[in-house]
Image (spheres, grey):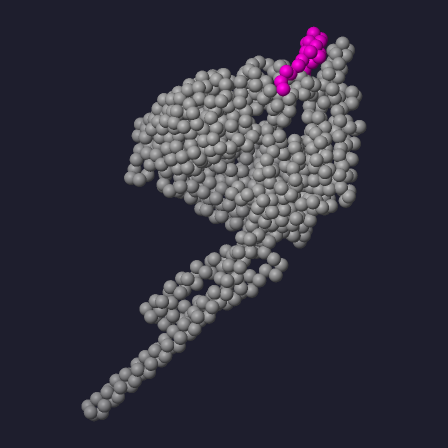
């Protein structure tokens, strides 16, 4: 029995061995098959990827060739396809790396890898098919349909009739070039602005392109002006011929267009610019000279004449004020005063504005006498026009206001400057007067600026910038040729090296900005010079070492946007300097000691390559505004000085350093070093803050900035603007008016928790751009308290599904319940652009009775527009784009709103360009409304 049992046992062992051998053989066979299958599939995948890569290269090359030539942009499907190709390329590279380790994997892992390769082959094949793009890669890139602000036309028998004649000529196929001429200030630009707006609103004549040529015309600037209007990129490094060819091709690709060339002083050849000719291509130009129209071969020429006596009197009365009642004696003199203006609209407006609120007959008699006897003995100035304009200048309240007005002439013709930019210069020059507090000084500055606008000496533009009429600027320059002494050669094309010693020692202000000056030499003696504007010049050969040695009272120095590499040592001697602007000097590596610049109020070193805090920074006891790169590892030296607390505006830009701002571990001076991080307390009086490219996960220090008015945060890693509040009694951002958030990849929302009552209640402008992780912006509880909101701009937040997160409405019958409606009484503009996943704006009805502009573009999943415009019956402008099916399916709480929005809807055949985000401007410009442009 034992023998039998042993035999059976041995047989079992043999069978088990055979079984294992078979299994091992099968495992080896499977492994061989899977390895072979994987190898074969990898070869197929490689071949398919090569074909896909070739197609990607063709598409990329075609797009590159189209860039800068055609007025086109890549279709959204093309951009998405390229992103998918990039994504699958990374995945295939990872698969190839894994396949090299295949021998280390178990069979199941190898099997999964084989299946993954098969799936990728299928995906690549599908991408290849999608990459055919039979209807082309490009979509039309049309300029935004903005309407220019314009004053109403004066006089049925003059301007309105002239406008009608010009319009009829433009739609006449027989005429391609039209000239509009007349004396300065007669209203040519006003008429053509109405024409431009009519083309924009009707679309009858195609695309409208407006370019102001001005007296300092050059081909390059005109080419850039036209190119900018049609979205074409031209390189400054190309010669004029290449640029004209590109511009010609771009304009030819448009079916029809009208180019309005305003304020031409001398003729040029259209082919030199790159403007094609043809019946579908219309050119309308304005000029003070009929000869210019003749030289430009205008098929029709229209003279804009002065107003009739009746029209001039009506305009004069209007500018005096509709409620003004003149006594019979004063009215008789006022009519004679109007006659002295010779029917010139600009003259009538300025004189009437100067005489507003004057009711004393003696003042009116004196005004008439001055107009009759006034002369302007300045070469080249019109004997009739300028005495009229000088009359208004003489009527300004005092010399300080007159000096503020003259200062505006330092900038180039047709230059738009921001109010903040100009007032900063006025303050530095001492034109405002020392009022102790910066805000008081700026309040006074705005009062002066608004007064100049009120009397028509300056013109406010639609974006709140300000510009001088060219005739008014000519007047100002004429005055400053005598006293005070200005040298104004801004934008006049000066090139090469210049020795400013050629100017008189009596000069008080010099403007050489926007030229092609490469070097400033010599040691000029200017004991009275207070302002020197040199921005936007190459200055690639720098400035002579002693250049600033004899400018003892210089207060404003602007060298922004130059190629200067170092500042001369003589800069250290400018003890009266108040404003030093060196922004965008991308080659600037070093500045000399600033220790003696104790009056410096504003220092802008943004976008320079200065690696260390300049010597003497700790001595800047008057510094109120600082714009720097935080990569300065020794910034704490300045912070420790205690002067940090004087700052009112601070711009922080960090491109490499993890720079932590917080309230923990402070020392007596508000600064402490912890390892590689600095913990800094921002001064609680700060009014404006810009943060760009900073590695910050949270911003707890912002809660302490009770006076902060403007905040711009871009390209940072923050998740929440404000974390959960530790102290619910302290308001967050109680004074904040403008909030700009852009390119924040981890951003989740305004507040992680519930904000204390009174937070953000002053917020007027809210702009959020490209925050790709953002699913909803704020809670309903916060939203309903933002009563001061005037403008909301949300664009390209790809994951946003809800704008406002909160509960559903009460019910069908409660839509008009005041408890169920959120009131935003001041909201004027509302823009939602390219929010592909947005399904809901707000679950409650939002009442916005002041709304006058709306844009909803690329929000294809939006299901409802819960907006109510109250009693508003007209006046809403903007664009609502989408498919017809989307529009018809939209739900409305207020059907009156749908009726008002209906004319704004247009069926989308292409993706609209959307709105330009404000935060695209340089960080410190956004926060301070382009203070030092």
Residue shown at 48% from the left, 48% from the top:
773
Vertical side of 181 occupied by 135: above or below? below
Residue 614: image quadrant is: top left
Where residue 797 appears, as percent x and y from the top left, is: 52, 47
Comparing 25 with 524, the one in front is: 524
Q: Is residue 930 visible?
A: no
Where residue 703 appears, as percent x and y from the top left, is: 43, 33
Where residue 300 appears, as percent x and y from the top left, is: 76, 37
Residue shown at 49% from the left, 45% from the top:
771
Is 749 a magenta residue?
no
Q: Locate residue 665 relative to residue 353 in the image: left or right.
A: left
Q: Over which residues does the magenta segment extend?
A: 355-379
Residue 668: image quadrant is: top left
Residue shown at 51% from the left, 40% from the top:
920
Quadrant of image for the N terminus: bottom left
Comparing 41 with 11, the one in front is: 41
Q: Locate residue 861 relative to residue 520 in the image: left or right.
A: right
Comparing 105 with 575, the one in front is: 575
Where residue 652 appears, as percent x and y from the top left, is: 42, 35
Residue shown at 50% from the left, 65% from the top:
51
Vertical side of 864 occupied by 22: above or below? below
Q: Is residue 132 visible?
A: yes
């Amino acid at each position: 029995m034992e023998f039998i049992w042993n035999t059976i046992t041995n047989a079992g062992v043999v069978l088990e061995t055979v079984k294992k051998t078979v299994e091992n053989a099968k495992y080896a066979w499977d492994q061989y098959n899977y390895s072979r299958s994987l190898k074969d599939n990898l070869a197929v995948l490689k071949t398919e990827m090569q074909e896909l890569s070739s197609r990607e290269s063709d598409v990329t090359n075609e797009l590159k060739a189209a860039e800068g030539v055609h007025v086109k942009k890549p279709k959204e499907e093309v951009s998405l396809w390229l992103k998918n190709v990039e994504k699958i390329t990374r995945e295939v590279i990872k698969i190839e790396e894994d396949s090299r380790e295949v021998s280390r994997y178990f069979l199941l892992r190898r099997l999964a890898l084989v299946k993954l390769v098969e799936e990728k082959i299928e995906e690549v094949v599908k991408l290849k098919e999608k990459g055919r793009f039979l209807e082309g890669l490009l979509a039309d890139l049309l300029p935004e349909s903005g309407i220019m602000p314009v004053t109403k036309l004066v006089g049925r028998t003059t301007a309105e009739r002239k406008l009608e004649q010009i319009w009829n000529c433009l739609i006449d196929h027989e005429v391609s070039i039209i000239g509009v001429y007349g004396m300065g200030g007669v209203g040519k630009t006003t008429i053509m602005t109405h024409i431009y707006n009519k083309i924009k609103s009707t679309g009858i004549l195609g695309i409208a392109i407006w370019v102001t040529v001005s007296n300092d015309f050059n081909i390059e600037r005109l080419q850039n002006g036209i190119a900018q209007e049609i979205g074409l990129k031209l390189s400054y490094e190309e010669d004029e011929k290449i640029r004209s060819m590109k511009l010609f091709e771009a304009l030819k690709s448009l079916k029809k267009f009208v180019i309005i060339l305003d304020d031409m002083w001398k003729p040029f050849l259209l082919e030199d610019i790159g403007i094609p000719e043809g019946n579908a291509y219309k050119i309308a130009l304005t000029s003070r000279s009929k000869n210019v129209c003749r030289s430009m071969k205008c098929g029709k020429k229209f003279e804009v004449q002065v107003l009739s006596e009746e029209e001039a009197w009506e305009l004069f009365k209007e500018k005096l004020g509709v409620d003004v009642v003149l006594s019979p004696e004063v009215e008789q003199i006022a009519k004679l005063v109007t006659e002295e203006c010779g029917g010139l609209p600009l003259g009538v407006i300025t004189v009437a504005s100067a005489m507003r609120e004057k009711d004393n007959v003696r003042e009116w008699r004196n005004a008439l006498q001055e107009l009759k006897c006034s002369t302007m003995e300045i070469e080249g100035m019109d004997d009739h026009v300028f005495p009229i304009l000088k009359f208004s200048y003489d009527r300004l309240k005092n010399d300080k206001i007159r000096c503020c007005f003259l200062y505006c002439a330092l900038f180039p013709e047709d230059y738009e400057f921001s109010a903040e930019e100009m007032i900063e210069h006025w303050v530095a020059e001492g034109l405002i007067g020392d009022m102790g507090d910066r805000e008081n000084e700026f309040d006074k500055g705005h009062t002066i600026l608004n007064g100049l606008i009120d009397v028509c000496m300056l013109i406010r533009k639609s974006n709140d910038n300000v510009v001088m009429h060219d005739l008014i600027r000519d007047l100002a320059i004429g005055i400053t040729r005598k006293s005070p002494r200005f040298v104004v050669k801004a934008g006049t094309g000066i090139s090469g090296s210049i020795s400013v010693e050629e100017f008189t020692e009596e000069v008080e202000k010099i403007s050489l900005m926007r030229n092609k000056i490469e070097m400033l030499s010599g040691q000029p003696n200017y004991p009275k010079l207070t302002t020197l504007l040199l921005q936007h010049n190459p200055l690639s050969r720098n400035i002579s070492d002693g250049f600033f040695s004899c400018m003892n009272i210089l207060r404003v120095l602007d060298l922004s946007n130059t190629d200067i590499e170092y500042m001369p040592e003589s800069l250290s001697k400018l003890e009266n300097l108040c404003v030093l602007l060196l922004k965008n000097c991308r080659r600037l590596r070093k500045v000399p000691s600033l220790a003696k610049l104790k009056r410096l109020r504003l220092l802008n070193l943004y976008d320079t390559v200065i690696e260390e805090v300049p010597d003497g920074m700790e001595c800047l006891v008057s510094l109120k505004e600082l714009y720097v790169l935080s990569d300065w590892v020794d910034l704490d030296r300045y912070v420790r000085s205690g002067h940090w607390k004087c700052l009112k505006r601070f711009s922080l830009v960090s491109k490499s350093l993890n720079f932590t701002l917080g309230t923990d571990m402070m020392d007596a001076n508000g600064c402490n070093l912890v390892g590689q991080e600095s913990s800094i307390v921002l001064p609680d009086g700060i009014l404006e803050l810009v943060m760009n490219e900073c590695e910050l996960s949270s911003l707890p220090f912002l809660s302490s900035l009770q006076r902060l008015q403007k905040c711009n945060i871009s390209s940072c890693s923050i998740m929440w603007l404000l974390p959960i509040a530790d102290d619910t009694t302290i308001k967050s951002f109680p004074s904040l008016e403008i909030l700009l958030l852009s390119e924040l990849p981890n951003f989740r929302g305004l507040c992680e928790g519930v904000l204390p009552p009174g937070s953000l209640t002053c917020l007027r402008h809210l702009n959020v751009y490209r925050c790709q992780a953002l699913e909803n912006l704020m809670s309903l509880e916060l939203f309903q308290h933002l009563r001061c909101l005037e403008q909301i701009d949300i664009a390209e937040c790809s994951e946003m599904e809800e704008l406002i997160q909160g509960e559903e409405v009460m019910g069908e019958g409660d839509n008009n319940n005041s408890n169920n409606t959120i009131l935003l009484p001041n909201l004027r503009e509302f823009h939602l652009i390219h929010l592909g996943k947005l399904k809901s704006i707000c679950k409650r009805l939002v009442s916005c009775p002041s709304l006058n502009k709306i844009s909803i573009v690329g929000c294809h999943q939006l299901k409802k527009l819960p907006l109510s415009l109250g009693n508003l019956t007209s006046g809403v402008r903007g664009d609502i784009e989408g498919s017809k099916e989307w529009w018809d399916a939209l739900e409305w709480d207020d059907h009156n709103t749908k009726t008002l929005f209906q004319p704004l809807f247009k069926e989308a055949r292409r993706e609209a360009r959307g709105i330009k985000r404000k935060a695209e401007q340089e960080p410190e410009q956004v926060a301070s409304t382009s203070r030092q442009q």
